[in-house]
């Protein structure tokens, strides 16, 4: 039994395809691959990433994509244009926060984020396929596998999975990252960018910072072991405190 997982993509289509190729080389083209979300924003080809994953799933590829906090911004703008994510400490709109990467996502659809807001909204609704907005908005919040629980940001310790709040699943850091609790399954997550995938024993962070020019992490999880997949093969990931 094995499970493959890929970290935060952030519009990096070439890196995503390369990560898939590393997985295909290790486990074949029918390998189960779970993605921790944040498909869009910051990188150059958010539209291409969404198209690629949707097309693969439509063709029957056993790919699972969970919802990240960034995956909510574009569909929310299209259907509730004044929405501000309560998870943002700044309480700034997606379009007004330069660090969120809205301009790059809109540019991938041929749009100029500097247009007046009303005009930009109208053009976005014309340029972004409704299927893309629906896809991003309807991604599952987590994926539970016998080997791991895959979720974008993490979980609230001490709360049953079915009672977890969406805001925590896509945004949590404080209360989760420092927890040494045994969560039951290994929690595989992204959201908090590191230099590379890191195993903490109870959780595995696979956001290697592809949004910031670093590699897109792909890992293979098997009973009792985790490996990072690189171009020249597997690298074991052992818990930091072991």
Image (cartoon, rainbow, N blue to C red):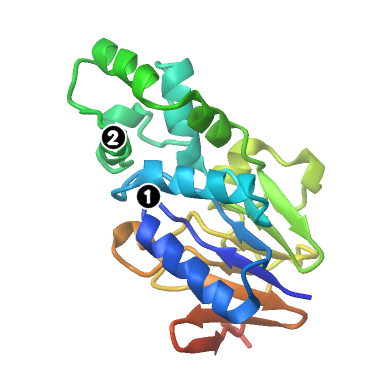
* Cα–Cα gap, marks 2 and 1: 17 Å
Which sits in the foreground, 159 or 128?
Answer: 128
**Whether residue 172 is visible:** no
Task: Classify 117 as above or below 107.
Answer: above
Query: Which element type, helix, strand or loop, lies under badge 1?
Result: loop
List the single residue furthest toward the front.
59
Q: How many marks?
A: 2
Residue 225 falls left or right of residue 17: right
* Residue drawn where x is 62% and y is 39% of the image: 139
**Circle 1 Cα neighbour tier, 10 Å, few/some/many (<14 / 14–19 / ≥20):** many
* Residue drawn where x is 61% and y is 43% of the image: 168
Residue 56 percent coordinates (x, y): 57, 51
Quadrant that contains the C terminus: bottom right
Pointer 2 or 1: first along the chain: 1
State the mark number for residue 104: none
Viewer-nearest of discs 2 and 1? 1
Residue 152 percent coordinates (x, y): 57, 51
Q: Residue at label 1? A: 11
**Whether residue 55 is visible:** yes
**Circle 2 Cα neighbour tier, 10 Å, few/some/many (<14 / 14–19 / ≥20):** some
Which sits in the foreground, 21 or 122?
Answer: 21
Query: Which element type, helix, strand or loop, lies under badge 2?
Result: loop
* Quarter of the figure with residue 110: top left
Residue 166 percent coordinates (x, y): 64, 37
* Residue drawn where x is 51% and y is 88% of the image: 233
Q: Residue at label 2? A: 97
* Residue drawn where x is 66% and y is 43% of the image: 141
Quadrant that contains the N terminus: bottom right
Task: Classify 86 as above or below 59.
Answer: above
């Amino acid at each position: 039994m094995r499970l493959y997982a890929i970290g935060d993509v952030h519009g990096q289509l070439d890196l995503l395809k390369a990560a898939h190729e590393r997985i295909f080389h290790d486990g074949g083209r029918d390998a189960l691959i779970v993605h921790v979300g944040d498909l869009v924003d910051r990188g150059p080809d958010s539209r291409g990433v969404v198209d690629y994953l949707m097309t693969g799933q439509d063709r029957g590829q056993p790919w699972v994509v969970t919802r990240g906090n960034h995956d909510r911004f574009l569909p929310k703008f299209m259907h509730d244009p004044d929405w501000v994510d309560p998870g943002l400490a700044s309480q700034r709109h997606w379009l007004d926060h330069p660090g969120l990467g809205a301009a790059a996502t809109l540019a991938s659809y041929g749009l100029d984020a500097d247009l007046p807001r009303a005009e930009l909204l109208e053009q976005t609704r014309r340029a972004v396929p409704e299927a893309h907005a629906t896809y991003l908005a309807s991604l599952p919040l987590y994926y539970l596998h016998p080997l791991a629980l895959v979720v974008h940001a993490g979980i609230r310790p001490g709360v049953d999975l079915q009672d977890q709040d969406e805001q925590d699943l896509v945004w949590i850091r404080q209360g989760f990252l420092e927890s040494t609790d045994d969560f039951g399954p290994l929690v595989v997550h992204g959201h908090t960018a590191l230099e590379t995938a890191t195993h903490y024993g109870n959780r595995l962070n696979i956001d290697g910072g592809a949004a910031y020019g670093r590699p897109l992490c792909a890992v293979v999880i098997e009973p009792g072991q985790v490996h990072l997949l690189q171009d020249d093969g597997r690298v074991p990931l052992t818990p930091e405190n072991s």
